[in-house]
Amino acid sequence: MNADFEKRFGQNIRIHREKTGMTQELLSAKLQLNGCDITRSAVAKIEVGQRHVYPDEIKLIKEILNINYDELFNI
């Protein structure tokens, strides 16, 4: 992915996570409970565009944050 896109995508995840009042730790825990081996540190890196996001993670993040793909990819 394009680095600028990844950074904006990560910021969008952070915005929606914060709107729900969820911490990075809680998001990573919910991802782990659903089969994604991801740490709080990895979530932080995703939010600043320093780590790629895998399709299964994107799908679960969307479901956990209760948003649709348009909201998630609204760059």
Image: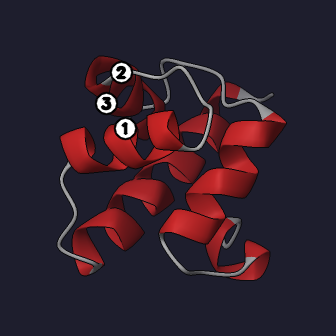
User: Answer yes or no: do the residues labelled 3 and 1 have beta carbons within 8 Å?
Assistant: no
Mark 2 crowd level (few <14, some 14–19, many ≥20, 10 Å Cα): some
**Nearer mark to the viewer, of 3 and 1:** 1
Residue at the image point whose x is 39% and y is 23% from the top: 45
Question: Can residue 75 be spotted in the picture?
Answer: no
The vertical placement of 71 against 37, above or below, is below
- For disc 3, the marked residue is 44
Looking at the rendered structure, the kind of residue marked 3 is Ala
At horizontal 21% and vertical 39% (from top left) the residue drawn is 25
Task: Name the residue beneath numbered marker 1.
Answer: 28
Q: Quick one: label 3 or label 1, which is nearer the N terminus? A: 1
* Residue 8 placement, left or right of 74: left
Report the label total: 3
- The answer to which quarter of the image holds residue 37 is top right
Residue type at the position of mark 2: Thr
From the viewer's perspective, is residue 71 above or below residue 8?
Answer: below
Give the camera-side residue of 61 and 30: 30
**Residue 5 image offset from top left, x and y in percent:** 67, 42
Residue 22 versus residue 39 in the image, above or below:
below
Q: Quadrant of residue 41?
A: top left
Quarter in which the N terminus is drawn:
top right
Which quadrant holds the C terminus? Answer: bottom right
Is residue 54 or residue 50 the one in the foreground? 54
Q: Residue 15: x, y in percent?
A: 34, 67
At mark 2, the secondary structure is loop
Residue under numbered circle 2: 39
Which of the two marks, 2 or 3, is nearer to us in this view?
A: 2
Amino acid at the residue labelled 1? Ser
Q: CA distance from mark 2 to mark 1?
A: 6 Å
